[in-house]
Image (cartoon, grey):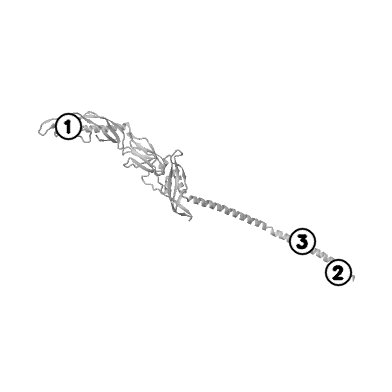
Amino acid sequence: MSETQGTPADEPRDGGQAGRADGAEGAEGADRAEGATGVAGSPAAPRRRRRRLVLIGAGVLLFLLAAAAAVGVGRTAASHRPEAAVAAYLEAVQQGDAERAFALDGTEVGDDDVLLTDEAYAAASDRVSDFDVAPAVVDGESATVEATVQQGGEAGPRWQQSFALVSDGRDLLVFPRWELQPVELGTLTVQVGAPSSATVSVAGAELPRGDSATVELRALPGSYDVELGGGGDLWGAPAVTGTASGAGSRGTPAVLVAELTEAGEASARAAVDGWVSGCVGSPDPRPEGCSFALLNGDGGYELSNQKWTLETAPTYDVGAWDGTGWDVTSVTEGAASYSADARDASGATGTFGSVSPVPVRVAGVVTDVTPEGAAFEAGPFL
């Protein structure tokens, strides 16, 4: 009996220990479970942080790309404004790049446009120094831009110029493309008072003269040196400067007037004196192209041994170029007498001649003086 009762009495003690063991194991399992959960979850936090950084970086990148795109679009739009085409043209002119300017506006340069080259414009002074382009006035497919142009620095002329443009399609299907129309150029006027054999150079380029004393050349804004050549040591003119300004302006003309040197005047006087000698040497009582004559001619007589005799030589001045030549004017009249042997219809003979000396005047122009001599055109005589 005592053994039977003793056995149950021991069980609760074993059971209590077992319960405590189970409880300890449960607590340890719980701890292991919590520990396992903590170890397994630790990589998730860095991944979430990396995702946030990636998203933030992507946002910043998109913002920068959008900003860059906006700037690019803005610049593209600005470069496709009519004002941009005008500014590009004026910048080329300001930089002395004539060929680029004409490529931008489509100006056609002919053989006589000797000033519309980079070389000629490089030789010019007082060129475009500044400009200000006003907002364009757009009317459908056309536009007008006004610009204020400054020439030769602050002290130089300043003028308004209008530029015309037309639409020439679109770039990227959005941005209009504006084409600058040929710009109206200013004119350099060159006036030449010199023989037809003279040569004229403008900014180092030879000028096509033709038959006109005045030549007008299309030119970009600037001052151009003009020189006269061909006279050697006989005649010449100091170099002058002409100015071309804005559209439709004739600027300041360059005026060249040839002056005779001492050697040139001596040659001119030799030609005039030769003309007087030729008239006096004529046997005709009314020599052709001369300033003196017998009023009644030969009087109806048969003449022989006719001659003029210069009693007093005329004096004269050789003056300035008057448009056709160097002007020759009489200072004092000379005098000449005429004599001849005469026979009338009946066969009677006698002496025929001027009752008194006739006046000899000198007038005309010396049209050219060359190493071979001078050319004198006499008259008119009043």
* Amino acid of disc 3: Glu
Outermost residue to the left: 346
Mark 3 lies on a secondary structure that is helix
Q: Which residue is mark 2?
A: 8
Please name the residue that numbered disc 3 is placed on.
28
* Disc 1 and disc 3 in contact, CB within 8 angstroms: no
Q: Earlier in the sequence, mark 1 or mark 3?
A: 3
Task: Check if mark 2's residue and mark 3's residue have beta carbons within 8 Å.
Answer: no
Marker disc for residue 175:
none
Residue at image position (22%, 30%) is 359
> Which comes sooner in the sequence, label 2 or label 1?
2
Q: Which mark is residue 306?
A: 1
Disc 3 residue crowd, few under 14, some 14–19, many 20+, Cα 10 Å: few
Please, what secondary structure does the residue beneath circle 2 have?
A: helix
On the question of residue 56 being in view, the answer is: yes
> Real-space Cα distance between discs 2 and 1?
195 Å
Q: CA distance from mark 2 to mark 3?
A: 30 Å
Q: Quadrant of the C terminus?
A: top left
Q: Is residue 214 above or below residue 356?
A: below
Q: Using the rendered view, name the quadrant where residue 50 is placed.
A: bottom right
Residue 6: x and y in percent read 88, 68
Seen at 82% across and 64% down, the residue is 17
Counting from the top left corner in percent of width and height, residue 15 is at 82, 66
Q: Farthest residue in the top direction?
A: 311
Disc 1 or disc 3, which is closer to the eye? 1
